[in-house]
Amino acid sequence: MGNETFHIDQAAQTLKLLGDPTRLTIMALVQHTECCVCEIVEILQMSQPSVSQHLKKLRDGGLVKERRGGRWVFYSLNTSHETVPIIHQVLAHLPDQKEKLKALEDSGLPLQCRR
Amino acid sequence: MGNETFHIDQAAQTLKLLGDPTRLTIMALVQHTECCVCEIVEILQMSQPSVSQHLKKLRDGGLVKERRGGRWVFYSLNTSHETVPIIHQVLAHLPDQKEKLKALEDSGLPLQCRR
DNA sequence: ACATTGTATAAGCATACACTTATATGTGCA
DNA sequence: TGCACATATAAGTGTATGCTTATACAATGT
């Protein structure tokens, strides 16, 4: 029960975080592009606090990193996490979320974060 | 939100099941070799009901299949589940559990299931 | 300094989870 | 038929989860 168990626990922790539709979608969103919280809220059609709490879990688990830019906070995949290989391969099996980001951009909603 | 959402939910459900150290270890155990419940109990050093309940979850989720052989029940990976590709890739990143099965076999414990 | 906007945190609540102990079911054998 | 073994299920319990509403914090612009 030395090194191996650690790996299993580590992987399980990551998979647990990915094992929620909201968080899994967020991960798919931020996988390639940095995303602003307000964009995520808009795309997921969820309350801002709820999204914020999911982001906190992903942050605490080390799966995403944040960058503050003015009033906005941008999230992206934390590529230095130990389980990134697993994460990438999981996300590779999911439908691309770029379209949703593009659709949001094209929708003309008054999101100021991209200016 | 047609086909895509379904896939995300499906993947999330699988990942949720994998997101527990006990279940993840079980999956790693039964990945290549059919395993008897008593072997799993012995390897995990957990109570039999607890293991049984985890197996039920994996069964209900379609991740494993069971085969009854005499008094024993053998579990193995359900390779016809929709998310097998994800499962395989996740498990590929985990330490091999064959050693534990071998160690159990060599330990001389009175497990009758293999005769 | 103050109001506005964007995000995080706090508190409360209903539900889900993982374990325990106790019991039921199922199979083989005397 | 009755006992022993292997596994499943039931009931109970403490904790975790995901949401809601309310509020705090942070940065900007006037």
Image (cartoon, coloured by chain):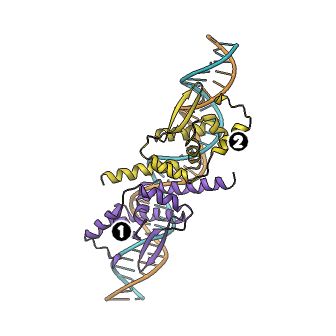
Chain colours: A yellow, B purple, C orange, D cyan
**Which amino acid lies under the numbered mark 1 shown in the image of this protein?**
Glu
Image quadrant assignment for residue A39: top right
Who's the residue at 39% across and 53% down the image?
A: A8
Crowding near pointer 1: few (<14 within 10 Å), some, many (20+)? some
Which chain letter goes with mark 1? B
In this view, B98 is above or below B7: below
Residue B13 badge: none
| Residue B59, percent from left and from top | 51, 66
Q: Are marks 2 and 1 in contact (CB under 8 Å)?
A: no
What kind of residue is marked 2? Ala
Query: Quick one: D4 or A99, which is closer to the camera?
Result: A99
| Residue C7 x/y as whole percent | 58, 31
Which numbered tag is attached to residue B39? 1
Tell me which residue sits at (46%, 64%) in the image: B55
Q: Report x, y in % for residue B15.
A: 51, 54
Q: CA distance from mark 2 to mark 1?
A: 52 Å
Q: Nearer the viewer, residue B85 or A18?
A: B85
- Residue indicated by mark 2: A103
